């Protein structure tokens, strides 16, 4: 009888443990609906609206008037320009705010370069802008070995391998539409583990769609994974692998620019965790973003009308759980 009681008690303890371990809710202390009992984040966190003014770091050189993507690597800020720009990577010394290297990508053409990403061995340059008429049937990513960039100073030339891709849900023969009205435009990309991930810029849907893409050279298909209502147009992305945080930047149709912080997600289900929006003050056409360290980012804005191309800094410390 005693053994049966012990057995019954063990079952109760196991049930209680499983029940506690599986409590889902908002686990982010920065959220207004933080649940201290929750163990597993379920993406339900809500946040009080907040607006901040980024810190101006510098007005960018004229050669980066159309800057559209950036990464921080080898203690340099590597940037690209978008449509019509030269097929060049520009490396900036962030202490002097000066360009110290220009690297031409051999046999490449800048139809509409929009973002740049990296992993341990490679840099990826995405020529996947599609806002002119929405009719691009194929898109290109240039894959450059970091080893080809090391050990050089000044200007140089590198030869890439090429990834060509289509979206699995885009028509094989896209119809021509008016400018800025397609949902298969893209300006944001990250490298995460063994895949590339694209965050689209939906002109009609006002959402961003997440696509997954192989890093292998050749022709690939970008598979649709999820979508998120961002209330605007996503124009840049970066990831800090050490903290598993993603930052997206963009702006609304009314001109409000913003950041989204994605963290606490499961695996590569980037929209399953916390999604915190931060509004950015000041009129700029923000196009790019890069982690400098785990809690500090740079954002880049291209020239637009009377606005100059700018590089700004934002600290994320106050927006992350203590």
Image: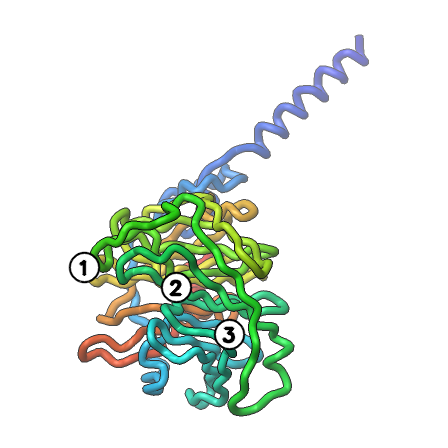
- Residue 7 lies, with reference to residue 243, above or below; the image says above
User: Would you name the residue on which mark 3 appears?
Assistant: 72
152 lies left or right of 99: right
Residues at marks 2 and 3, CA–CA distance in whole angstroms: 14 Å
Looking at the picture, tell me which residue is in the foreground, 89 or 10: 89
x, y percent for residue 245: 50, 58
How many neighbours does mark 3 have within 10 angstroms: few (below 14), some (14-19), or many (20 or more)?
A: many
Compare marks 1 and 2 and give the one earlier in the sequence. Answer: 2
Numbered disc 3: secondary structure:
strand
Q: Residue at x 28, y 50 (%)?
A: 175
User: Would you name the residue on which mark 1 appears?
Assistant: 254
Numbered disc 2: secondary structure:
strand
Looking at the picture, tell me which residue is in the foreground, 248 or 217: 217
Residues at marks 1 and 3, CA–CA distance in whole angstroms: 30 Å
- Residue 152 lies, with reference to residue 145, above or below; the image says below
x, y percent for residue 161: 57, 68
Q: Residue at x 33, y 75 (%)?
A: 84
User: Would you name the residue on which mark 2 appears?
Assistant: 236
């Amino acid at each position: 009888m005693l053994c049966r009681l012990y057995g019954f008690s063990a079952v109760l303890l196991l049930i209680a443990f499983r029940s506690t371990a599986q409590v889902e809710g908002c686990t982010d202390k920065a959220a207004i609906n933080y649940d201290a009992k929750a163990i597993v984040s379920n993406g339900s966190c809500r946040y009080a609206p907040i607006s901040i003014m980024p810190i101006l770091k510098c007005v960018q050189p004229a050669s980066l008037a159309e800057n559209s993507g950036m990464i921080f690597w080898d203690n340099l800020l590597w940037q690209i320009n978008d449509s019509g720009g030269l097929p060049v990577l520009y490396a900036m010394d962030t202490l002097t705010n000066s360009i110290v290297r220009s690297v031409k990508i051999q046999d490449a053409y800048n139809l509409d370069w929009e973002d740049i990403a990296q992993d341990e061995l490679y840099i990826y340059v995405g020529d996947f802008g599609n806002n002119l008429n929405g009719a691009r049937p194929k898109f290109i990513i240039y894959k450059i070995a970091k080893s080809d960039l090391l050990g050089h100073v000044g200007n140089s030339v590198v030869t890439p391998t090429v990834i060509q891709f289509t979206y699995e849900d885009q028509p094989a023969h896209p119809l021509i539409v008016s400018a800025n009205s397609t949902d298969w435009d893209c300006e944001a990309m990250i490298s995460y583990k063994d895949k590339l991930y694209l965050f689209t810029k939906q002109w009609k849907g006002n959402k961003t769609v997440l696509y997954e893409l192989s890093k292998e050279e050749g022709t690939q298909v970008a598979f649709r994974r999820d979508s998120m209502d961002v209330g605007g147009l996503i124009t840049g992305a970066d990831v800090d692998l050490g903290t598993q945080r993603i930052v997206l930047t963009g702006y609304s149709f009314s001109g409000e620019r913003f950041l989204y912080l994605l963290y606490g997600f499961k695996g590569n289900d980037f929209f399953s965790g916390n999604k915190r929006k931060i509004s950015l003050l000041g009129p700029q056409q923000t196009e790019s973003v890069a982690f400098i360290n785990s809690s500090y980012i740079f954002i880049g804005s291209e020239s637009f009308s009377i606005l100059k191309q700018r590089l700004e800094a934002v600290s994320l410390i106050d927006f992350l759980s203590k």
